[in-house]
Amino acid sequence: MAQQQETQIEETESIISFIFFIKIMSKRRTWVFLFISVYAILLTISWNFLKSVLSWYESTISADSSNPTISISSSGWPALYASVLLGVAFGVLSMVAALAVVLPATLVTWITILVLLTFAGKPRRDLVLEGKRLTLDITGFVIKILIKEGNVVAALCAVLAYFVLVISRNKQLQNGVDDH
């Protein structure tokens, strides 16, 4: 008898917490808060990554200039490594940002197509099969576009970062100024 009451209390508590969770998640401001929080975390991580890559680049260049017999920086390899890392970071960040915009639009498209198929008189069984096929098609299409756009952003950022790093280093060498 006591065990039945405890299980009923636990079930009631879990139902109440589930209802509370659903009420919270159905609020628009909750999703806005989650969206802003995730983007703040992503920007913080990418900013720290950017600072660490640039710090590594500067330390490599300064260590190189202190030892004139070995000159790696004149070949541009540290700038190339740093620019590739920066390109990859910003490519991934752009894919995540695009994913946040694409998911709701994709969901609306998927629902619209299923509703139109329902109004067209498709039987329920065929509708389920079409829904599964649509889900696979739309997901594949979205992933291909996200990867393509992420690669384009990564390549552009890498090329831009390389030229900025090389030009800034050449200006430092021409002026004879070394920060360290």
Image (cartoon, grey):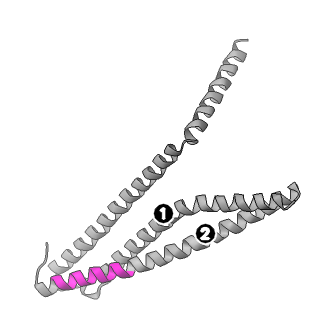
Amino acid identity at mark 1: Ala
Q: Residue at x 42, y 58 (%)?
A: 42
- Is 114 or 146 nearer to us in this picture? 114
Extreme residue toward the top, this view: 1
Asked which quadrant contains residue 130, the reply is bottom right
Q: Earlier in the sequence, mark 2 or mark 1?
A: 1
Q: Is residue 34 visible?
A: yes
> Foreground residue, 60 or 110?
110
Give left or right: position of 102 versus 66.
right
Extent of the magenta region = 159-172
Position in image of residue 78 (x %, y %): 30, 79
Judge left or right: residue 162 versus residue 107.
left
Q: Is residue 72 visible?
A: no
> Image quadrant of residue 56?
bottom left
What's the amino acid at mark 2? Ile
Q: Position of residue 118 (x, y in %)?
A: 82, 58
Count up the numbered dots. 2
- Identify the residue shown where x is 37% and y is 72%: 86
Q: Is residue 118 left or right of residue 29?
A: right
Dot 2: within a 10 Å radius of its alpha carbon, few (fewer than 14), some, or many (20 or more) residues? few
Q: Quick one: quadrant of the N terminus?
A: top right
Q: Which residue is mark 2?
A: 143
Q: Secondary structure at mark 1?
A: helix
Residue position marked by numbered label 1 in the rendering: 97
The overriding secondary structure of the stretch rendered in magenta is: helix
Going 11% across and 80% down the picture, which residue do you hit?
Answer: 177
Residue at the front extreme? 119
